Amino acid sequence: MEIVIATDKHIKYAIKISQTIDKSAEQRGTGIAKRTPEYIEKKIKSGNAVIALEGEKFAGFCYIETFGDKNFVVHSGLIVHPDFRNQGLAKKIKTKVFEYSQKRYPKSKIFGITTGLAVMKINYELGYKPVTFSELTDDPEFWKGCQTCTNYDVLQRTDKKMCLCTGMLYDGKKDKKKEHPYNSKSLSRLKRIKQSLFLKKKDQTKNK
């Protein structure tokens, strides 16, 4: 398995990456925004993407975006092809893009929003901590990326203060020592509470 910074020679995988993200979004039904092949290609050309390959076969992908005059960096589009799941590849890709971000944008805070407990665990192990959305970028371009997510109406209803996703932030300027151990049960409970609260309101709105 090879995990590298994507270059122009990897543009040929853009359609496959986009399709894999879309299919995963359909299966999960929540928390994944769509990315077009053109957008994936743009990220590859900019040198802001990491791709995993086994020989010539696409295995996984993730890209970097910057917001707020590069004060914030976010890792988006993390995806592992179904043939390579449950092998720890997501963590390896995430670690690669995390280390690359620190080298390329050393003064930036790194953050992400996700509904996936596996991604939350990986983020926590890298030094992220759960935060409120108010601690993340207020750059409208970032939040525009949520428009294709099935839960975008939740984000709108809360004026971008809360959603089913959990915000997580890594601030390299602060002490990297974790104050609390990772607690998957607490995060699972938080996710269920959010789903019960927001999805119930969503259904009530539809029935009116």
Image (spheres, helix red, strand yellow):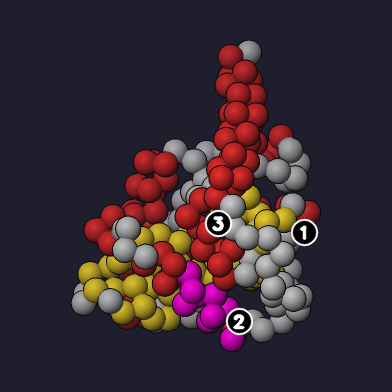
Separation of residues labelled 1 and 2 (CA atoms): 19 Å
Between 144 and 164, the one lying in front of the other is: 164
Q: In this picture, is 188 found above or below 41?
A: above
Q: Amino acid at mark 2?
A: Gln
**What crowding class fits label 2: few (fewer than 14 Cα within 10 Å), some (14-19), or many (20 or more)?**
some
- Cβ–Cβ below 8 Å for labels 1 and 2? no
Q: Where's residue 158, x and y in %?
A: 74, 38
| Residue 126 placement, left or right of 160 | left
Quadrant of the image occupied by residue 142: bottom right
Q: Amino acid at mark 3?
A: Met
Q: Where's residue 70, x and y in %?
A: 70, 75
Res. 139 in view: no
Pointer 2: what residue?
Answer: 102
N-terminal-most mark, 1 or 3: 3
**What crowding class fits label 3: few (fewer than 14 Cα within 10 Å), some (14-19), or many (20 or more)?**
many
- Cβ–Cβ below 8 Å for labels 2 and 3? no
SS for dot 1: helix
The structure residue drawn at horizontal position 47% and vertical position 55%, both measured from the top left corner, is 118
Between 132 and 48, the one lying in front of the other is: 132
Foreground disc of the pair 2, 3: 3
Pointer 1: what residue?
Answer: 135
Q: Which residues are magenta?
A: 94-103
Quadrant of the image occupied by residue 141: bottom right
Figure quadrant of the C terminus: top right
Figure quadrant of the N terminus: bottom left
The structure residue drawn at horizontal position 62% and vertical position 18%, both measured from the top left corner, is 204
Separation of residues labelled 1 and 3 (CA atoms): 17 Å
| Residue 70 placement, left or right of 11 | right
Pointer 3: what residue?
Answer: 120
- Cβ–Cβ below 8 Å for labels 1 and 3? no
Characterize the magenta stretch by its predominant secondary structure.
helix
